[in-house]
Amino acid sequence: MKTIFEYTDYREWLRDAFEEFKRQKTVISWRYMAMKLNADPGNLLRISQGKIHLATTMIIPMAKFFGLNDKETAFWTELVYFGRAKTDKEALSHYEKMQVLKGIPLKRLEKKELEFYRHWYYNAIRSTIGICNFKDDYLGLAEACTPVITEKQAKEAVILLNALKMIKQDEGGFWRVTDTFVSTGGNWRSEAVTCFQKETISLAKESLDRHHASLRDISTVTMTFNIDDISLIREKIKEFRTELLRLSQEGSNDNAVFQLNVQMFPLAIVKKIKEKS
């Protein structure tokens, strides 16, 4: 079984930990665990199936049940809160703490360093360097981007990424992505990030003409909801993004960089229409 620090989904860890516990102890069931935790066995099963969330009051008792040490318990706590987060800001806060507990340095971008978000291709090039052996073929790096950028832009991107310690050269002169986890910190909703989002949304629109349908998935659907349920919809979208991030982190032999934009916004709000008497 993987260490708990390799998980980003607390329910997945719970399922794996339960199976590992069962393999070692032989006699264990959700009912047995529920009895030890003074919990409802049906709820424990539904939690493992992703149907409901684990109550925060059960975090420490469950950590003790599985014999987690202090560091593992701290990670488990953040893992649960990350899974329960209702907003991007809340999820990011717990995810950052998880990275620190894993031993990954956390680099908060200062205002001057938000240049990283000035152009979409800075992020694309960093991700590209992470999945290929890049040394000094700046023209090839530029042409790998879609849309293609100039060789000069590719060089400038590498210079910036190196200055921000997001990449570094190994002994052979090849550029490697560092393990530093990047956060905008208090500038999460900064103007620079907003500009980055605008650029990627524009790229998504251009992709309709630039890329074959087999390389993209752009669909639209118009739905009606109660406006008070938007927080629930946002949570569902967050879960979808988290699952794709997990697939990305666990994947191997990656050979392409994708940008995902999930866009949802109101087209009409009926309660603003005044009813005639």
Image (spheres, grey):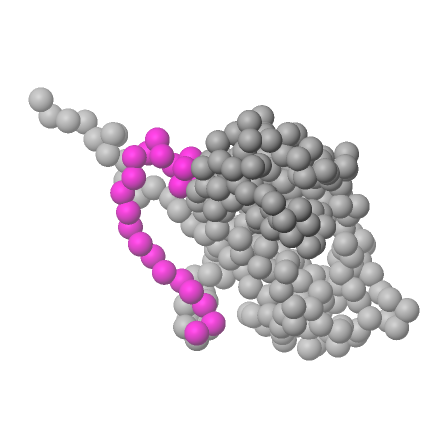
Q: Residue farthest to the right?
A: 171
Q: Quadrant of the N terminus?
A: bottom right
Q: Is residue 127 magenta?
A: no
Task: Name the residue at 67% across, 62% down.
Answer: 127
**Can residue 178 be seen in this snapshot?**
yes
The front one of 16 and 182 is 16
The front one of 22 and 151 is 22
Span of residues in magenta:
214-234
In the picture, measured across the screen, residue 182 lies left or right of residue 119, that is right
Vertical placement of residue 198 versus 157, above or below? above
Where does residue 47 sit, x and y in percent of width and height? 50, 40
Vertical placement of residue 81 versus 119, above or below? above
Task: Name the residue at 57% across, 36% down.
Answer: 33
In the picture, measured across the screen, residue 200 lies left or right of residue 100, that is left
Where does residue 198 sit, x and y in percent of width and height? 51, 51
Vertical placement of residue 260 versus 61, above or below? below
Task: Name the residue at 64% across, 30% down.
Answer: 61
Q: Residue farthest to the left?
A: 277
Q: Quadrant of the C terminus?
A: top left
Where does residue 26 sit, x and y in percent of width and height? 63, 49
Task: Name the residue at 33% across, 34% down.
Answer: 227
In the picture, measured across the screen, residue 81 lies left or right of residue 125, that is left
Where does residue 211 sit, x and y in percent of width and height? 46, 73
Q: Residue farthest to the front?
A: 27
The front one of 35 and 259 is 35
Quarter where residue 35 is shown: top right
**Can residue 116 be seen in this snapshot?**
no
